[in-house]
Image: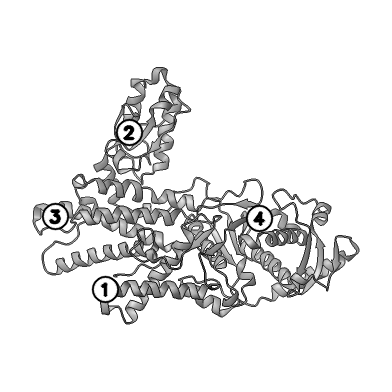
């Protein structure tokens, strides 16, 4: 393991620190002992990383850690690892305490690397992701656009952003064909690709029809112009026995619903498959790996599995494309008096946000600027309400719940409120500069970060600024090689991260007076705190951008 003297250049990563610490334990004969990063304010008073005492007993005689291992851990100097101040064995276990002033200095002098994911070790190999948002294929009007459909769109839009941050190529399909749906999504800050009539799609559909007609001699395909009553609204062109067809073509059915077989293929189904095929042809360049991720509501999952198989049957090349299904759970309105549309949901939340703003700020809540603020708060509230729950879990909406406003600490509006508090802080600082009360902001590298000794300051740096790159990695993690056809993604991770950050920031901001008296001997601490707040503000903006949320300058 590398060790040495000096100040290793470059950013510091929690994941790399844990990897190096684990390697040191393995080298000393303790492969089963695991390090844990502390996160609670109580535990961070005495330690930053810990191997619990029980794990030490399993690795060392009587749980006593050799002195040479403690010395080795104390002297680690590896690029990318956090600076260690001391390592010691306590009643709790093996403890690492970091050099906190040095950590503050190394991170806050340039925090821009911590607004992006941890660099990948995949040697530059990228995957082209085609995110197929299934509900948009059938959304012919805003009236038929359900709350569960909206959830799937939000998941797809967010997932596209975190994948792009990781350096992947991402394409969103299908294009929106209904202007009402497109305009509604724009209200939420989502600009989805719009419909462009492509002759290639029509040509591909014609080819598929010909292909299926050619197969009419087979017992697995037949014409069916008399659909069952429950599908009478769909014009059925062909009836395909998927299971026997898949077996004839040697396709693996592992992970598919065992009941999948009889498929009544409509014109819309062929259009769906044609758009998939053409997207792959247009998007994939050379030998770049391609993955199609079907983002689908639970009620449409079975039908999408049929489309998945139909594509593989119609296009031999589709077998080489990785297809995975990400399932979004239902959205249920609690005690509804009538069915609630997406438009009604938006207007209700906007009305509640406007009412809460008037109660807090009075008659000044009017005009274009306030309309923009309320639209932004509404968008954030809806996105957090639908995305703070793991995507496969049901979301229960209480439309009478006013905690979605800034009164609730777990809402998107509360996150936005804290963004506005930071903007107000820097506006106050700039106004004080113009009045000659404070000097201009110095270069960040010149600050004395040893003055940052308040518990909340280390909490903000260690749990949030340092952890944001790791959270971005977690949010973009999709296992394309997992068995079966279903995958999960941590689409809720950044929501939860932002809520926790906002609560801890709010506690700190309410307790600490950042802009102190205009006395020269206090400027050092003030500048260090302002740089910490600058990093938190940038982090909030970067995280919110993955949801296409624009924080208001003030509230």
Q: Which residue is mark 4?
A: 323
First-in-chain label (1 vs 4): 4
Disc 1/disc 2 C-alpha distance (Å): 47 Å
The picture places residue 501, in percent across and down from the top left corner, at 34, 54
Give the class, few, some or many, for how many residues have Cα within 10 Å of label 1's Cα (few <14, many ≥20).
few
Query: Which image quadrant: the N terminus?
Result: top left
- Quick one: label 2, few (<14), some, or many (20+) residues within 10 Å? many
**Residue 540 image offset from top left, x and y in percent:** 35, 59
Q: Is residue 161 visible?
A: no
Q: Is residue 223 visible?
A: yes
- Comes first in the chain, label 4 or label 2: 2
Mark 3 → mark 4, Cα distance in angstroms: 57 Å
Residue tagged by mark 2? 96
| Residue 61 falls left or right of residue 279 | left
Q: Which circle's residue, 3 or 2, is located before the other in the chain?
A: 2
Q: Looking at the image, do the residues carrying marks 1 and 2 touch, with CB atoms under 8 Å apart?
A: no
Secondary structure beneath label 3: helix
Kindly report which numbered mark, 1 or 4, lies closer to the viewer in this rendering: 1
Q: Which residue does the numbered mark 3 point to in the structure image?
A: 523
């Amino acid at each position: 393991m590398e060790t040495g003297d000096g100040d290793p250049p470059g950013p510091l990563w929690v994941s790399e620190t844990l990897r190096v610490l684990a390697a040191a334990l393995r080298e000393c004969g303790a492969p089963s002992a695991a390090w844990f990063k502390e996160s609670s304010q109580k535990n961070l008073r005495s330690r930053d990383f810990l191997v619990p005492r029980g794990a030490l007993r399993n690795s060392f005689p009587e749980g006593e850690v050799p002195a040479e291992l403690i010395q080795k851990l104390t002297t680690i100097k590896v690029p990318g690892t956090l600076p260690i101040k001391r390592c010691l064995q306590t009643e709790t276990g093996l403890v690492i305490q970091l050099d906190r002033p040095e950590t503050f200095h190394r991170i806050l002098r340039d925090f821009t690397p911590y607004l992006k994911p941890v660099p990948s070790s995949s040697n530059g190999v990228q995957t082209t992701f085609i995110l197929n948002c299934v509900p948009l294929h059938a959304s012919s009007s805003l009236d038929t656009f359900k709350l569960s459909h909206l959830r799937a769109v939000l998941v797809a839009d967010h997932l596209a952003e975190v994948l792009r941050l990781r350096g992947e190529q991402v394409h969103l399909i299908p294009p929106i064909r209904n202007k009402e749906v497109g305009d509604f999504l724009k209200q939420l800050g989502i600009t989805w690709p719009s419909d462009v009539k492509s002759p290639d799609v029509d040509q591909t559909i014609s080819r598929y029809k010909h292909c299926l007609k050619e197969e009419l001699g087979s017992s697995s395909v037949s014409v069916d112009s008399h659909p069952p009553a429950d599908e009478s609204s769909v014009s059925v062109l062909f009836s395909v026995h998927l299971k026997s067809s898949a077996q004839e073509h040697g396709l693996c059915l592992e992970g598919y619903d065992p009941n999948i077989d009889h498929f009544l293929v409509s014109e819309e189904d062929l259009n769906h498959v044609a758009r998939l095929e053409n997207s792959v042809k247009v998007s994939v360049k050379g030998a770049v790996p391609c993955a199609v991720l079907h983002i689908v509501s639970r009620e449409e999952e079975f039908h999408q599995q049929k489309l998945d198989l139909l594509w593989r049957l119609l296009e031999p090349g589709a077998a080489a494309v990785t297809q995975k299904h990400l399932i979004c759970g239902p959205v249920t309105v609690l005690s509804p008096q009538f069915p609630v549309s997406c438009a009604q949901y938006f207007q209700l939340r906007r009305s509640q946000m406007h009412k809460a703003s008037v109660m807090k700020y009075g008659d000044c809540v009017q005009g274009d600027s306030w309309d923009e603020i309320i639209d932004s708060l509404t968008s954030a509230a809806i996105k957090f309400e639908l995305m703070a729950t793991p995507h496969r879990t049901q979301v229960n909406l209480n439309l009478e719940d006013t905690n979605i406003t800034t009164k609730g600490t777990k809402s998107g509006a509360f996150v936005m409120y804290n963004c506005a508090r930071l903007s107000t802080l820097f506006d106050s600082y700039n106004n004080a500069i113009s009045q000659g009360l404070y000097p201009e902001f110095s270069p960040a590298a010149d600050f004395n970060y040893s003055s940052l000794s308040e518990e909340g300051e280390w909490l903000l740096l260690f749990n949030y600024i340092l952890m944001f790159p790791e959270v971005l990695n977690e949010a973009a993690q999709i296992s394309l090689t997992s068995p079966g056809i279903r995958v999960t993604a941590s689409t809720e991770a950044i929501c939860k991260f932002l809520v926790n950050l906002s609560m801890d920031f709010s506690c700190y901001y309410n307790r600490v007076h950042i802009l102190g008296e205009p006395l020269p001997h206090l400027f050092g601490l003030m500048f260090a705190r302002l740089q910490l707040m600058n990093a938190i503000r940038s982090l909030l903006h970067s995280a919110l951008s993955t949801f296409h949320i624009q924080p208001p300058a003030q509230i």
